[in-house]
Image: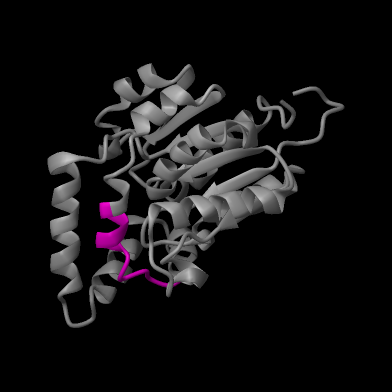
Amino acid sequence: MATSEAPVPVLLVHGIRTSATMWRYQEQALRAAGYPVLAIDLPGHGQRMSEPFTVPAALAAIDDGVAALGGRVLLVGLSLGGYYAVAYAAEHPDRVAGLVAAGCSAVPLGVFLEGYRLLARAIHRLPDRGLWLHENLVRLLLPAAGARDVLAGGAALDVMDSGLQATSTLTPLTSLAAYPGPVWLVNGALDHFRLNERRFLAACRTGEVVLVPRATHLSSLAQPELFTAILLRITGLVSPTA
């Protein structure tokens, strides 16, 4: 990026059952570096928890975020947010200067997805709909600061089945092939969502795989410093102008 050029705005899209608050560390670092940044809530999550989750509603939420930032953005999505960021970039390439698809290099179909849906239904039948399990797994699997950021946005207990069903209708490989801009597939080195990483990379017109060392699926929370350093490198490579 030329030094005279305005910094690219960054839009952050969260994973399932989390919210915009999961990006607090990255938001602070990006703002300190001079980048306009916005983390949004998808339907059924955070401040929009009462809203039903659908594909059109999720894509509309991303579009509202792009509009709020006032121009072409670096679009960053993790897990659920990654799949919808990919779909949005394919539909609106003129609004996406670059795409970071994190923790979503697995085709959301078949046994891979149905296993998650069955587990989600079983957990939702618990007396507290899985709240105790959700909160304790977050605290167990993430560093203390990351766990606080995730839990600050509340637990989207009712969105798992509808969110996963909606996501099963997406075609990320086709969408990556349709998007003409640069793509970074950022995955935790220990992430089980790397299952189809090579196929995802092959689908990109201009793509790069970036691994976050020692990170699991929620790499931005498991290794926030490393993930943020990757984002800052990428922002320096993306131009906000067409």
Residue at 43% over, 38% down: 102
Q: Is residue 68 visible?
A: yes
x then y, percent, for residue 207: 47, 20
Residue at 30% over, 70% down: 158
**Residue 153 horizontal side relative to residue 1, left or right:** left
Question: Eyeballing the image, is 132 above or below 147?
Answer: below
Q: Residue furthest bottom?
A: 127
x then y, percent, for residue 8: 71, 36
- Specify whether residue 158 is painted magenta: yes
x then y, percent, for residue 115: 14, 50
Question: Eyeballing the image, is 229 above or below 167?
Answer: above
Residue at 64% over, 53% down: 38
Residue at 81% over, 35% down: 6
- Which residues, given as a range, are shown in magenta? 154-165
Q: In which quarter of the image is residue 223?
A: top left
Query: How many tags in the picture?
Result: 0
Of residues 137 and 123, which is closer to you in this image? 123
Q: Quadrant of the C terminus?
A: top right
x then y, percent, for residue 59: 49, 50
Q: In which quarter of the image is the N terminus?
A: top right
**Residue 7 horizontal side relative to residue 126, left or right:** right
**Residue 18 horizontal side relative to residue 181, left or right:** left
Question: Eyeballing the image, is 197 above or below 10?
Answer: above
Question: Eyeballing the image, is 22 above or below 89?
Answer: below
- Specify whether residue 80 is painted magenta: no
